[in-house]
Amino acid sequence: MDQEHAGQETTSDAATPGDALRALPAEAAGRGTRFVSAQAMQARLFSVYDAAAAAEDALALVQNQLTLTLNRSYYEADEIEQMAQQLDGLLALDTVEPTTGELVSDD
């Protein structure tokens, strides 16, 4: 498999956009390396772009990471995991709806 297609394998099977990112280190390990190429990271970030657009902060994270891939040659698993947690966290926060009920006092 070539690097330009490496980032597109499991995106449709991922439960969350973060899971799509988390799959990259396993895919790299399957190719015999612990490093994920910037091209594979870029492809995967583009694949989660629409989902990230649901939350302004998540979209900003993906856009920032896409910019950073231009100056990088590889990523390690811990960096990807941290980014995946951030992305999932931002999207989860956006789906929580504020309650409109009354506040209850302790009296």
Image: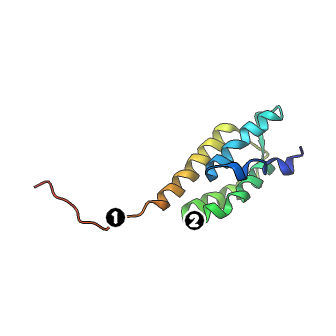
Q: Position of residue 22 (x, y in %)?
A: 66, 43
Q: Is residue 86 above or below residue 103?
A: above
- Which residue does the numbered mark 1 point to in the structure image? 99
Q: Position of residue 74 (x, y in %)?
A: 77, 43
Q: Residues within 10 Å of mark 2 (few under 14, many from 20)?
A: some
* Residue 35 or residue 49, whichever sits in front: 49
Secondary structure at numbered mark 2: loop
Instruction: Residue at the far left: name it.
Output: 107
Relative to 53, is 102 on the left or the right? Answer: left
- Which residue does the numbered mark 2 point to in the structure image? 54
Amino acid type, residue under disc 1 in the picture: Thr
Amino acid type, residue under disc 2 in the picture: Ala
Give how far apart the Cα atoms at labels 1 and 2 are.
20 Å
Q: Quadrant of the C terminus?
A: bottom left
Residue displayed at 31% across by 68% down: 100
Q: Position of residue 86 (x, y in %)?
A: 56, 50
Residue displayed at 23% across by 65% down: 102
Q: Position of residue 15 (x, y in %)?
A: 62, 49
Instruction: Residue at the far bottom: name it.
Output: 100
In the rendered view, how is the structure colored?
Answer: rainbow
Res. 66 mark: none
Which of pointers 1 and 2 lies earlier in the amino acid sequence? 2
Relative to 60, is 73 on the left or the right? Answer: right
Instruction: Residue at the far top: name it.
Output: 32
